[in-house]
Image (cartoon, grey):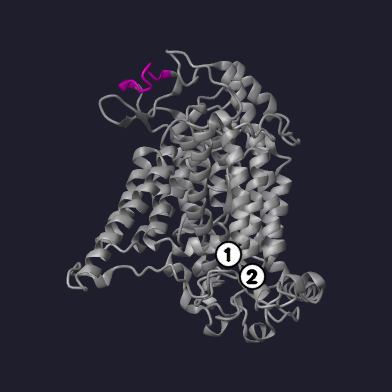
Amino acid sequence: MAARMREWSASINSAVAKSRVGYWFQLDGSGHRRERKGSYFLTELRAGVATFFAMAYIIAVNASIVADSGGTCVCSGTPDDPMCDADEAFLLCKQAIRRDAVTATAAISALATFSMGLFANMPVGVAPGMGLNAYFTYSVVGRHGSGPVPYQVALTAIFIEGWIFFALAIFGMRQWLARAIPASIKIATGVGIGLFLTIIGLTYGEGLGIIVGAQSTPVELAGCSPENRLEDGTCPSWDKMRYPGMWIGIFCGGILTVLLMMYRVKGAILMGILLVSIISWPRGTPVSYFPYTAQGNDSFDFFKKVVTFHPIENILNVQEWNIGEYGGQFGLALITFLYVDILDCTGTLYGVARFAGLIDPRTQDFEGSSVAYMVDAISISIGSILGVPPVTAFVESGAGISEGGKTGLVSVSAGFLFFISVFFAPIFASIPPYATGSVLILVGSMMATAVVDINWKYLGDAVPAFLAISIMPFTYSIADGLIAGVMSYIILNTIVWLLKLVTGGRIKPPNYEEKEPWTWRIPGGFFPGWLTRLVSGKKDFWREYDSDLDNAEPTLGKMDERHMSEDRVPSGEIRPAGGEYGLADEKTAQPETVSASNEKGARND
């Protein structure tokens, strides 16, 4: 029986590889000059399923974070309730926003992931990014619309930003900007966002409710039932750490999830979220997500539909194009999204590409970078029309890569599964915040693992990185942390450089040689390959020179087998050192496994 199954699998893999589909995705046996050795159709499909289950939590988590901005709902706060936390009409409107965001998140994830696989041939999942959605809600729009930029104006800024990124991708500037940013700042950005998400996961709005803001201290211990909170938002001493939902979230959504991940169970994060949700769905229990209130009844009525298509009613195409009265705020949103995206989205694609072994050691670029960036850029703009924050590549794509995925078929199959999830909006919209709070903390802990890659030996690298890490969570602003890190890096290192220049190198820090090297001159040139070939007069400029193709060897075909073995699973799924949130872990990436003969083979067009 087993032998027959192997023969059946081999015949299917062989048939697909010899078809046009196999040639397009460069499967092993397709005859393509860049076929990726060891890539088989059924393996790619299995890897796509692994990628989806590793990413599926974003549907519920992103919807909750977007809804916390208030969306198009208007909060008419009172002195007793300035944030509309007790305004029943506003809370019902917020629930509708969350349902819309569930459909929008699943839809844009399906489109972006499918397109990344089909056009860029990369085994990468794309969805609204963790960190970017937090920045959108809590720094730009503000919780319940309390920030400097209205929701509609922020979406307009994202739409324009996507097309700016599209132009940057075409002319290679986005790739250059990503490579020119100091590595310590890239890594610190991921760590800082991880701590920021951890704070969100500890609060009531989108988390477990373990901490709250206080008067005598910045924060204090909480953990009481929401209805027992005092007027100032704190918890009475007699009810601290006694909220049943919090403990369900800690043990079933946190401890159990970590244990499953320790044993390398695929989809562990999703399992934890579903278990807590299932426990909270029955009515009449202390942890029920559907209390017998107007808001609870409305939520339960929607939940009972189970399988249905929920149209996007409140956040679809709501951009505010009359930005005259928001000139300064609109400019602020656009600029901040630009540089946050440059760090976050671009760093993510480089991290995932490095883990997949697609980085060219000479140019420090990856195969199909221009196409991948253009797909990302267009998806950002389409996502803004659907009402969600910018999309990005997900480090959870490493789960599929660890399963043996090597081509865009991984993303195509994962995108198809995201499409199916659009029709399960009632389920995803009924996931309580304490079911996803532990996930945010867990993601934050995984992101923090990259801190060991910062150059702590030289203060000119270490201090700016530390400022970026610490200021992000303490100011509740990713932008403030980035500004602190980048500006301090420029000031410190410019002063050292000037002193060294003026004194002919006599005055410099004793350990100056330990400074992390940085230059804006990146091997491979400023402009992308297609533009260089166009200027040189090549008619079919979109195709590489035959000499480059002949000398190219498939990067993934030359990867160390250990990179795809079971032993590599923790690096891809459990320990993503950067990835979606910044620069990937050099130990995980194993750039030395890339064949030297592939220097000319990486596709820069």
Magenta span includes 487: no
- Secondary element under disc 1, as helix, strand or loop, is loop
Q: Quick check: can you spot residue 467?
A: yes
**Dot 2 crowding, Cα within 10 Å, few <14, some 14–19, many 20+:** some
The numbered mark, 2 or 1, whose residue comes first in the sequence reads: 1
Which residues lie in the magenta part? 228-238
Q: Nearer the viewer, residue 515 or 445?
A: 515
Magenta span includes 237: yes
- Residues at badges 2 and 1 in contact (C-beta under 8 Å)? yes
- Give percent across and percent down for residue 448: 39, 54
In the rendered view of the protein, which quadrant contains the N terminus? bottom right
- Secondary element under disc 2, as helix, strand or loop, is helix
- Give percent across and percent down for residue 421: 70, 44
- Give percent across and percent down for residue 284: 57, 22
Q: Quick check: can you spot residue 51?
A: no
Relative height, residue 189 to residue 596 (above, below)? above
Q: Nearer the viewer, residue 323 or 277?
A: 323
User: Which residue is painted at 64% across and 58% down in the image?
Assistant: 374
Residue type, label 2: Leu
| Residue topped by disc 1 | 172
Q: Nearer the viewer, residue 98 or 318?
A: 318
| Residue topped by disc 2 | 531
In the rendered view of the protein, which quadrant contains the C terminus? bottom right
**Dot 1 crowding, Cα within 10 Å, few <14, some 14–19, many 20+:** many
Does the magenta stretch mainly form a helix, a strand or a loop?
Answer: loop
- Give percent across and percent down for residue 113: 66, 55
Mark linked to residue 198:
none
472 with respect to 288 (left or right): left
User: Which residue is painted at 52% across and 27% down in the image?
Assistant: 145
Relative height, residue 355 to residue 375 (above, below)? below
Task: Measure how far apart labels 2 and 1 are at the Cα level.
Answer: 9 Å
Residue type, label 1: Gly
